[in-house]
Amino acid sequence: MVKRILSRSFVYVFLSVAAFLSVFPLYWMFISATNTNLDIIRGTLLPGAHIIENFKGLIDAPNTQLGMAYWNSTRNAVILTFLNVLICSMAGYGFEVFHSKAKDRLMAILLLSMMVPFAATMIPLFQMMADMKFLNSMIGFALPFISTPFLIMLFRQSARSFPYELVEAARVDGVSEVGIFFKMFVPTMKAPYAAAIVISFMAAWNSFLWPRLIMMRTESFTMPIIIQNLQEGYVTDNGVITLAVLITSLPTIIIFFILQRYFAEGLMGTVK
């Protein structure tokens, strides 16, 4: 009995510490956005009353068009997420439903490509985008990442739990392959689609290196680029920077909380 109580106490203490370590960075970001630079340096742990001043400083910062940057990030993330999820789900479905040894080899090559660091392909990609006149454009931002091996693998694993008998029955009834995909496969894959949307949206929204490379005009900047620009001056205002980080983090937090119900199920490839 005593061992059981001690064991439970240890579990509760461990979970409490883990929860505190997970939540504290968010709390620190919030209180820092409301304090002055001096208060942040002093390590103040209580909310302040300078959030309006920090917001004015963010708007008045040079090379910082907050509204335009927020719109660019939103547009890029939404369009890229839609295309990424659609193309990867169709590819994963095709790899599994139209299975063959050649597709297995191709899938293995796609998975091996995940081991190649982006820095190794960055310069060739930039040269390709420059030759096609896609610099400072949405196409240049989205085209290299319009599909990812990880999401293709995720949907392929999910398609394995999709009853193949339904596909055969639909074909007998005269349903086209496109109809089977959109009318039968997509509605039953809520969890994998939710996980893919979260992963793709977060990657597109937080992308910094590639947009920084191809987005050379101020009107094309995204929020991560704006945050980086705030750190390049002679004087760094941590309150303004933290407020920008807080504003930038809100969409990803909202998307995750909306879809968290299906996120873990989607990563495990389960279907309900």
Image: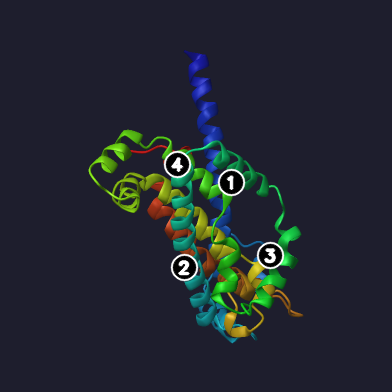
Q: CA distance from mark 2 to mark 4?
A: 28 Å
Name the outermost residue toward the left: 173
CA–CA distance in space, label 3 to label 1 = 21 Å
Estimate how packed mark 1 is, as few (under 14), some (14 to 19) or many (20 or more) residues with alpha carbons within 10 Å: few
Give the residue pinned by disc 1: 21
The kind of residue tagged 2 is: Ile
**Residue 73, image x and y in percent?**
52, 72
1 in relation to 80, above or below: above
From the image, state whether disc 2 or disc 1 is nearer to you: 2
N-terminal-most mark, 2 or 3 = 3
Query: Residue 266's x, y, as percent?
Result: 44, 43
Amino acid at the residue labelled 1: Leu
**Amino acid type, callout 4:** Phe
Residue at 22%, 43% in the rendered image: 173
**Sequence-wise, which precedes: disc 2 or disc 4?**
2
Q: Which numbered disc covers residue 98? A: 4
Left or right of residue 165: residue 81: right
* Residue under numbered circle 3: 42
**How busy is the neighbourhood of tag 2: few (under 14 within 10 Å), some, or many (20 plus)?**
some
- Residue occupying image coordinates x 54% and y 61%: 146
Mark 2 vs mark 1: which is more N-terminal? 1
